[in-house]
Image (cartoon, rainbow, N blue to C red):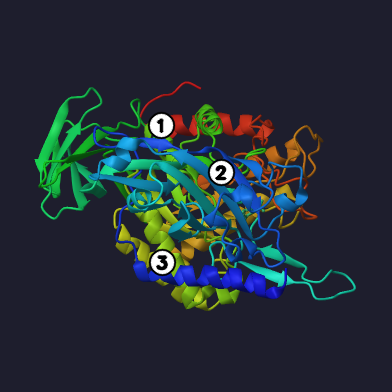
Amino acid sequence: MGSSGAERAAERLLLAALCSVCQALQDGMLFPTESPSREVKDVSGLWIFRADESPERSRGFEQQWYKSPLAETGPVIDMPVPSSYNDITQDAQIRDFIGWVWYEKDVWVPARWIQDRGTRIVLRVGSAHYYSVLWVNGVKVTEHVGGHLPFEADISGVLRQTSGNQCRITIAVNNTLTLETLPPGTIQYMTDRSRYPAGYFVQNTNFDFFNYAGIHRPVLLYTTPKAHIDDITVETTFSDNIGLVSFNVSVLGSSKAAVKVTLSAQDGRCVASADGSRGVLKVTDVNLWWPYLMHENPAYLYSMEVQATAEDGQTDVYTLPVGIRTVKVTSTQFLINNKPFYFHGVNKHEDADIRGKGFDWPLVVKDFNLMKWMGANSFRTSHYPYAEEILQMADRHGIVIIDECPGVGIKDIRSFGNVSLAHHLTFMEELVRRDKNHPSVVMWSVANEPASEMPPAGFYFKELVSHTRSLDSSRPVTYITASNYARDLGAPYVDVICVNSYFSWYQDPGHTELIGLQLNTQFDNWYGKYQKPIIQSEYGADAVPGLHSDPPMMFTEEYQKTVLQNYHNVFDQKRKEFVIGELIWNFADFMTSQSIIRVVGNKKGIFTRQRQPKAGAFLLRERYWRIANETGNTLFKL
Ligand code: GCB
């Protein structure tokens, strides 16, 4: 691949990034659900796949692979969707591929969808890494910059104009990361011909997880009536025993649709209703949404049915789960429903054998079972937004979420420029639009460990945090810092200080006896300077499962346990003051790129990548249940 290929790919990325900034989010992004007026057809499953291995990665576009069946353009292979493509084959070139890959699937669209001109047909991709272009029957229908978030296109027109109810979906996905993408990266050409062949290049990144790529979440076709509910925004509060749900419904395709909103309790009883696209519902004897282990009846969800009836009499119906709760931050506390909430939880990754970052229900349900088993009440979506289905599970189980955007590895000063900032702001808009109605989401995290000591970081984070607040005033905003309190330029703008530290691991490796002193200093410095509550948003140590030594040595299960115990001693003092949470790094072992500091991935999991507990998991389990019994409103049995 010559330099022009990657430059062209980068250029395409850039153009699309700018384009999406100009369009700034007019439409909603409701999760597709079935209703009396809506149908959903999941077209995930087996797709065909072709990586564009041409030196410049541009052959697919030059030869217009989207115009004809992909198999006619050259050799194709089977590829499951959703899944990362990297670990599916035996081919290291596919595992490490950088550039455009092509996916295709032929599906049938029900004839009645096509015939009924009042039906709108939408194609939606849950997420693809990172830059995608979508065609239906050879016609381009949309493109999208950024992984981890959904994008969709109204394809009714294309289907009605082309070959009836046969629908060939082609998706080209490019995983190239540049200084302006999120996360950022650089393509580096190796020009020393005595060491590298012509055109040799690598993708550099500054994050510690494998750069999995492909179509990571389900691909759906769904319908709505032409006049349809485009977006719903809900905000909740309460006073005494009265819950208040303010709603705002936007309808597209009709300027005079009559909107009716009905809120039902879990037993189906209607508890409030209103007419109009905006308003406030009052719920007497409200059942609040409480976190897991904070209440004996956690995660109470009402069901809000929205009906929009257009002039022609057609009604669109959409049902949204609603949890009524409040979130507030003081200088020493995090309050949920006006009661102090202590985060005892985990950091996760979307990561597993074979499927990489591909969405997988068995894995999701297993992970929730494990979190509940260990008494975790929260997790952070390190280092990017997780699948919507995961947030829905968290809503239903009362697991509290810090929702993070993929601002990870921002270490190069050129990634603090205007183009990067514009894309970052747009990303936050898309994230808030998607996740704003989840009661489980209690805080936005705009980045992880950026180079926040570099001078542009002050302006960058001021803009980013204030823009996020303007999108959603009901939740606090943070970013995760690893820099020294005295050199951090973004901290003045956040609501909660989140700090990552690895005493006795990256600093003073082997010296667990220093943790107490260093961690106390860390907390006192940050609190002394900012008087904001603090979450220890990462701490931990690698443990290769089955490796033992006493006295403990690095990489053994005993060492991981000892590090945790030393941190916990300090947390137990400081949580009486201003420390409001602890999130272990990491829930499970996960894959990284190959390097001399990783032995087939990062081993800081308290579970293995196959979700089996290491010694540290049992330690945390005892601790979390004990804390729940001290801080919750009721007694729980382990
Ligand atoms: C960190 C990063 C996380 C890494 C972790 C580690 O500070 O936020 O992405 O995986 O440390 O294990 O090095």
* Helix, strand or loop under label 1: helix
Badge nearest the viewer, 3 or 2: 3
Q: Which mark is residue 598?
A: none
Residue lying at 22% horizontally and 37% vertically, measured from the top left: 304
Residue at the front extreme of this rendering: 163
Q: Is mark 1 within 8 Å of ligand 1?
A: no
Amino acid, disc 3: Ser
* Helix, strand or loop under label 2: loop
Q: Which residue is mark 1?
A: 397
Q: Which residue is mark 3?
A: 20
Using a 10 Å C-alpha cutoff, classify the residue at mark 3 as few (fewer than 14 neighbours), some (14 to 19) or many (20 or more).
some
* Helix, strand or loop under label 3: helix
Q: Which residue is mark 2?
A: 348
Report the label total. 3
Q: CA distance from mark 1 to mark 3?
A: 35 Å
Q: Earlier in the sequence, mark 2 or mark 1?
A: 2
Q: Is residue 478 left or right of residue 324?
A: right
- Contact between marks 3 and 2 (CB within 8 A): the answer is no
Query: 533 and 214: which one is in front?
Result: 214
Residue lying at 35% horizontally and 67% vertically, measured from the top left: 23
Horizontal and vertical percent position of residue 60: 61, 60
Up/down of 269 relative to 101, above or below: above
Up/down of 42 relative to 482, above or below: above
Horizontal and vertical percent position of residue 89: 72, 42
Query: 497 and 247: which one is in front?
Result: 247
- Contact between marks 1 and 3 (CB within 8 A): the answer is no
- Contact between marks 2 and 1 (CB within 8 A): the answer is no
Say which quarter of the image contains residue 588: top right
Amino acid, disc 1: His
Q: CA distance from mark 2 to mark 1?
A: 17 Å
Q: Is residue 120 left or right of residue 458?
A: left
Residue at the right extreme of this rendering: 194
